[in-house]
C-alpha cells in the first residue's frame, strides 16, 4: 500500500496550518489549556473551538459535503487529527473520529442526517459504553440487556470505564439482545441520550488523573430508531468503531519527544560536550525514528480506509506502537530528570510535569480500545492468518 502523501494533501495541510495560525489567539489558548489539562474531557473552551472550526467549514474532513463536511479522504482526516494533536488542540476525540465515522458507515439515512449534522453543530458529545465489570477483553460476554418492549427496548445493566460520560450528551452502548450463548452474535448497538431517565453515572479517577465513569442502566427506554444496524448485528458496528478508535484516536508521541528535547536542551544535555550527551543524542535519535515509523504506520491505515479496505491488523499494530513509544519516551525523560521529574502541577516542574503525567497515564493507552495483548492476537489472526 502506497503511503506517500499526495501534493493535494500537502496543500490541504498547509491550508489547514494557515487557517489554524489565523484563529483568535484567545480561543486557541483557552482550548489548548483545557485540552492539556484533560484531553478526555472536551469541555466549554474545547467545544467553542470545535464550533468555530465547524462554522468555518473545517470539521468533518472526510464526510460528504451534503453533511457539511469537506468530502476529502481518510488521509486528510488523519492529517487533520494529527495537526491538531501536535498543537495540543482538541481534535474531536471519540465523537468526530470514532462514533461519527461509524454512523456514516453503519447508521441508516435518518441517523446519518440527524447525528452527523448535530455533531457538526457541536451539539453532541459521545462517550463509549462497551466494557463491563466482567466483560473487557472478552466483550462478547457482556450482560447489559436490551429487552424488546413496544416500539423499543428497556436497557438494564452496568457499564464501567465509559470515559467522558459525565460530560457526554449521548452514550454509544453495546447491549445484549440475543441469548448469552449467542455471544457476539447476540449484541446490538444503541445511541442513548445520557440524561435518559434510569441512567446513573458515577465518576472514577485514574492514577494518571483521567476522569472515567461507571454507569448503571435501570430499565432505560430506548426507541428502536436508536439502534444502529440490525438487531443482533452490533458486533460489526462495534468492530468498525474500534478500528476507527485504534486508527484516529491516535496519540502520536511527537509532542512528548518535543517536551523531552526541550528539557534536555535547557539542561545542557544535548551539547555534545560529554559522553553522556552523545549517548542521549543517540537515544533521542532512536525515539525520533520510532515517531516517524508511527506516523507512517498510521498513514498506511488511513490510506487503506481511503481505498475502502479495513485496516484490522494495521490499526492494532499502530495502537501498540504509539502506546509503548509514548511510555518509553516519558520513561527516558524521567530517568534523566531523576526524582525532581516526579513533580506535577507545580510552576517550574521539569518539562512542566508533562513527562511524568504521560508515564502515569500510559497504562490507559495499553488498555483503552482493547489491551495490547488482544491487539497482538488480532495482528496474528487478521494480519498473518493464524488460527484463533
Ligand atoms: C482509563 C480507562 C479508560 C477506558 N475507557 C473506556 C471507554 O471509554 N469505553 C469502554 O467501553 N471501555 C473503556 N475502557 C475499558 C478497556 O477497554 C478495558 O479495560 C480493556 O478492554 C480490558 O478489559 P478489562 O479491564 O476487563 O481487563 P481484562 O480483560 O480482564 O484483562 C486483564 C489482563 O488479561 C489480559 N488478557 C485478557 N484476555 C486475554 C487473551 N485472550 N489473551 C491474552 N491476554 C489476555 C489482558 O491483556 C490484560 O492484561 C477503559 C479502560 C481504562 C483503564
Image (cartoon, grey):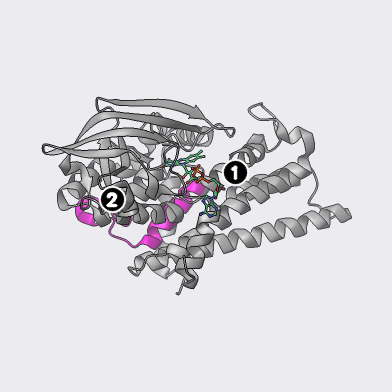
Q: Which sits in the foreground, 74 or 236?
A: 236
Question: Neighbour class for label 1 at 10 Å: few (<14), some, many (≥20)?
Answer: many
Q: Is residue 11 left or right of residue 111?
A: right
The boundaries of the magenta stretch are 58-85
Is residue 76 within the magenta segment? yes
Q: Residue furthest bottom?
A: 1
Q: Position of residue 143 (x, y in %)?
A: 35, 40
Measured Cα–Cα span from mark 1 to mark 2: 33 Å
Q: Earlier in the sequence, mark 1 or mark 2?
A: 2
- Mark 2 falls on what kind of element? helix
Asked if ligand 1 lies within 8 A of label 2, the reply is no
Q: Position of residue 352 (x, y in %)?
A: 65, 35
What residue is disc 1 on? Answer: 362
What residue is disc 2 on? Answer: 186
> Image point 46% across, 60% down: which residue?
315
Q: Is residue 25 above or below residue 84?
A: above
- Mark 1 falls on what kind of element? helix
Quadrant of the snapshot with the N terminus:
bottom left
> Image point 67% across, 57% down: which residue?
287
Amino acid at each position: 500500500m502506497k503511503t506517500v502523501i499526495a501534493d493535494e494533501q500537502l496543500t490541504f495541510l498547509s491550508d489547514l496550518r494557515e487557517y489554524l495560525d489565523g484563529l483568535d489567539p484567545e480561543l486557541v489558548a483557552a482550548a489548548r489549556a483545557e485540552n492539556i489539562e484533560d484531553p478526555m474531557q472536551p469541555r466549554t473552551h474545547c467545544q467553542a473551538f470545535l464550533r468555530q472550526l465547524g462554522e468555518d467549514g473545517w470539521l468533518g474532513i472526510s464526510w460528504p459535503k451534503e453533511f457539511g463536511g469537506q468530502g476529502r479522504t481518510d488521509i486528510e482526516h488523519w492529517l487533520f487529527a494529527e495537526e491538531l494533536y501536535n498543537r495540543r488542540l482538541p481534535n474531536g476525540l471519540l465523537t468526530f473520529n470514532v462514533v461519527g465515522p461509524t454512523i456514516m458507515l453503519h447508521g441508516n439515512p435518518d441517523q446519518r442526517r440527524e447525528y452527523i449534522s448535530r455533531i457538526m453543530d457541536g451539539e453532541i458529545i459521545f462517550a463509549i459504553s462497551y466494557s463491563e465489570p466482567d466483560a473487557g477483553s472478552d466483550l462478547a460476554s457482556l450482560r447489559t440487556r436490551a429487552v424488546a418492549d413496544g416500539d423499543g427496548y428497556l436497557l438494564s445493566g452496568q457499564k464501567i470505564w465509559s470515559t467522558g460520560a459525565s460530560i457526554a450528551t449521548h452514550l454509544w452502548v453495546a447491549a445484549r439482545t440475543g441469548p448469552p450463548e449467542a455471544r457476539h452474535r447476540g449484541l446490538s448497538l444503541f445511541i442513548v441520550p445520557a440524561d435518559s431517565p434510569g441512567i446513573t453515572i458515577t465518576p472514577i479517577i485514574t492514577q494518571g488523573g483521567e476522569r472515567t465513569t461507571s454507569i448503571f442502566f435501570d430499565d432505560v427506554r430506548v426507541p428502536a430508531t436508536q439502534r444502529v444496524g440490525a438487531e443482533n448485528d452490533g458486533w460489526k458496528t462495534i468492530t468498525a468503531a474500534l478500528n476507527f478508535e485504534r486508527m484516529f484516536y491516535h496519540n502520536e508521541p511527537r509532542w512528548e519527544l518535543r517536551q523531552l528535547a526541550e528539557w534536555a536542551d535547557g539542561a545542557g544535555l544535548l551539547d555534545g560536550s560529554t559522553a553522556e550527551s552523545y549517548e542521549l543524542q543517540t537515544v533521542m535519535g532512536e525515539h525520533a525514528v520510532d515517531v516517524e515509523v508511527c506516523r507512517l504506520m498510521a498513514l498506511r491505515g488511513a490510506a487503506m480506509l481511503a481505498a475502502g479496505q479495513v485496516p484490522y491488523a494495521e490499526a492494532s499494530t499502530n495502537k501498540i506502537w504509539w502506546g509503548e513509544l509514548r511510555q518509553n519516551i516519558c520513561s527516558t525523560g524521567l530517568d534523566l530528570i531523576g526524582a525532581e521529574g516526579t513533580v506535577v502541577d507545580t510552576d517550574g516542574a521539569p518539562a512542566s510535569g508533562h513527562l511524568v503525567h504521560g508515564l502515569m497515564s500510559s497504562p490507559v493507552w495499553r488498555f483503552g480500545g482493547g489491551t495490547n495483548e488482544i491487539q497482538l492476537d488480532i495482528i496474528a489472526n487478521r494480519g498473518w492468518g493464524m488460527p484463533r
